[in-house]
Image (cartoon, helix red, strand yellow):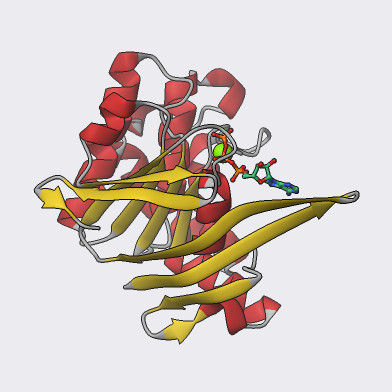
Amino acid sequence: MLEMTDVTKTYRVGGQTVRALDGITLSLCGGEFVSVVGPSGAGKSTLLHLLGALDRPDAGSIRFQGAEIAALDDEAQSEFRRHSVGFVFQFFNLLPTMTAWENVAVPKLLDGSRMAKVKSRALDLLAVVGLGDRAEHRPSELSGGQMQRVAVARALMMDPPLILADEPTGNLDTKTGAAIMALLTDIAHQDERSVVMVTHNLGAASATDRVITLTDGRIGSDVLAGGELT
Ligand SMILES: Nc1ncnc2c1ncn2[C@@H]1O[C@H](COP(=O)(O)OP(=O)(O)OP(=O)(O)O)[C@@H](O)[C@H]1O
Ligand SMILES: [Mg+2]
């Protein structure tokens, strides 16, 4: 579904150069829940940003369903992000003045749909994440775990084949974290999506189908639950 070949990403700040990704090759198949682990600064978020076309690689190829996404122009890339990728960030990125269901509906609204048309789907998704009774609450009226579940529902709004989550359980208690994990597992398995999750929690990582370890911008290991991949 998505293939990265020999991808390199370098940042230049002042006179300093940081090689955030250094020759990454990997492929993702549908129906798989993949975790990415590694020390701080290893390149995990950079990898997610490139998979989701939030940023471009310096070199290498990123192909999604056969098309080279790194070569698309800005407009085509934002089209790819809107329709094919659902992002779940650590700090939720919810809009404070909007209610839970309006936040979930945002991707469709950005895509030109009318509020009234998308409300029922937004409410259905809130029910899926167990928040059917919080639809009219604003983010400030929700707990951290509830905000994170709203962010997961929003990521599903466009029904994207690829879900990218950067530490979705990072600042949640164990029980809420486990509920988010169960939800992401369901999403990956029931709907044949690829879910890629960055986490510092090795317990959470070991519950996924495949664990990719990044160190200094390189893949150290890539292990399937059933055996070694590379
Ligand atoms: N926008 C940027 N400009 C310059 N350097 C950056 C930028 N983003 C990341 N870096 C550098 O690239 C490297 C990889 O960063 P990245 O955010 O991918 O790490 P990470 O594995 O997600 O770490 P953490 O676990 O702390 O979130 C780091 O050394 C960081 O300093
Ligand atoms: Mg990070």
Residue depicted at 55% across the width and 19% down the height:
141
Please tell me whether residue 100 is drawn above or below residue 15 in the rendered image: above
Please tell me whether residue 15 is drawn above or below residue 52 in the rendered image: above
Residue 7 showing in the rendered view: yes
Report the image quarter containing ligand 2. Answer: top right
Where residue 89 appears, x then y in whole percent? 53, 40
Residue furthest to the right in view is 14
Q: Where the C terminus falls, by quadrant?
A: bottom left
Where residue 53 appears, x then y in whole percent? 57, 66
Residue depicted at 51% across the width and 45% down the height:
44
Residue depicted at 11% across the width and 49% down the height:
227
Q: For the image shown, how many numbered marks are present on the structure?
A: 0
For the residue pair 22 and 191, the one nearer the viewer reads as 22
Residue 120 showing in the rendered view: no
Q: Where the N terminus falls, by quadrant?
A: bottom left
Where residue 147 appears, x then y in whole percent? 49, 29
In this image, 34 relative to 20: left or right? left
For the residue pair 38 and 149, the one nearer the viewer reads as 38
Please tell me whether residue 179 is drawn above or below residue 107 in the rendered image: above
In this image, 159 relative to 71: left or right? left
Where residue 216 appears, x then y in whole percent? 54, 45
Residue depicted at 42% across the width and 62% down the height:
158
For the residue pair 58 and 116, the one nearer the viewer reads as 58
